[in-house]
Amino acid sequence: MLIPAIPEGMARAGIIGANGISGLMLAKLLGGSLRKIWVRDPNFDLRRALYDPDLQVEMHLFDIMCLKDQLEGLDVLFLATPHELSMDIVAACGDICLKNAIRIIDLSGAFRLPVALFEKAYGMKHTAPEWLPYFSYGLMPWAKELTTPFVANPGCYATSGLMALLPLAKTVNLTNCVIDAKSGATGAGRSLREELLFIEVADTCMPYRVGKHQHMAEIAHAMELFAGVQIDFHFSTSLLPIKRGIVSALYLSLLEEGASLDAAYNAAYGHMAQAVRFGQADRHMLSLEGVVGTNRTHIGYEVIGKKVYVFSCIDNMIKGAAGQSIENMERV
């Protein structure tokens, strides 16, 4: 897996929510750097889940009331938790994390957006707005300066779309854009919902939350944050009958016919050959098999006249969640 190396002894990490899909993937990637995990299921066995009987890690049942007393010895705390729980944890433990220089990296959407945008996109009240200034939006490599002590890890659909779109901000028409994103079923976590049952997702492609997905607001906000531009776009999300991977198809038009996408992507990612691969859309560039199990982004494109077709592929569990959070850990 293409994950940034963690020097031995550099970071002692704890995870809240390691029994979830993203949290478990994060535990696998961290390996020996992991010190503590907090779980809500007393029957959860991390060693069995990781197939590593020799893993040395402290296990604790999650109790927000006594969490402050269990943070000792950590350098970084990962929150692989639902939005509501992330807000509660930061409100309860943010002060002691600041005092003891413990970095928080939140994989939920709780701290990615300003209050008004969050409440509109997620349909819930933000219960810890006073902590938003302590978080930076950690889209790597675009978040060049992380000056805050805590990081809001980007969402998976947003990561896939933004990695393809940000380099083109001055090349394409951003008022006439379509992003059609499709994800494997792990993107929904372990939710026990009827529409996620095998008999519902197998052998089909199922659109959901069309034009209403919370990552739509995240993409628009990040385009202003990193490119200084506003974007008006269509956004469609669909569920694929596969475990993992995201492919986002972007349909755009050039501002000027003949403009070079090669030049735009080379300027953004030309120095990152191992992390981002880009070029003409062919089966190697567009296959999810090329990114699943890695932290890479593949971007393939075609230009016909002024019409632009771009395809962005990532692993939703790694670059879209756990892997990017490790990138953020090494930057804070």
Image: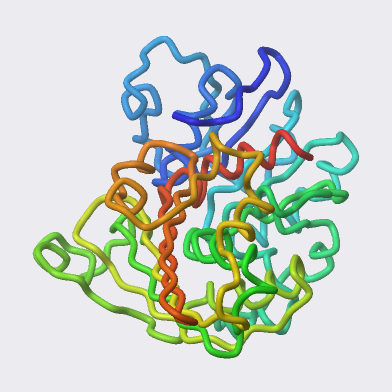
Look at the image and tell me in which quarter the N terminus lies. top left
Above-or-below relation of 325 to 163: above
Q: In this rendering, would 279 be left or right of 101?
A: left
Residue 158 at x, y percent in the picture: 54, 65
Q: Residue 237 appears at what percent x and percent y?
A: 37, 75
Name the outermost residue toward the right.
99
Name which residue lies at 52% across and 76% down. Answer: 214
Identify which residue is drawn at 19% across, 60% down. Answer: 241
Q: Residue furthest top?
A: 54
* Depth check, front residue: 196 or 314: 314
**225 over 324 or under it: above or below:** below
Of the 4 image quadrants, the one containing the C terminus is top right
Q: Nearer the viewer, residue 126 or 311?
A: 311
Percent of width and height locating residue 31: 51, 21
Which scheme is used to colour this image of the protein? rainbow
**In the shown orientation, is residue 185 left or right of residue 309?**
left
Side (left or right) of 67 relative to 81: right
Total labels: the figure holds 0
Quadrant of residue 263 within the rendered picture: bottom right
Q: Position of residue 197 (x, y in %)?
A: 17, 63
User: Measuring 76% from the left and 27% from the top, which residue is drawn there?
Assistant: 72
Closer to us: 73 or 29: 29
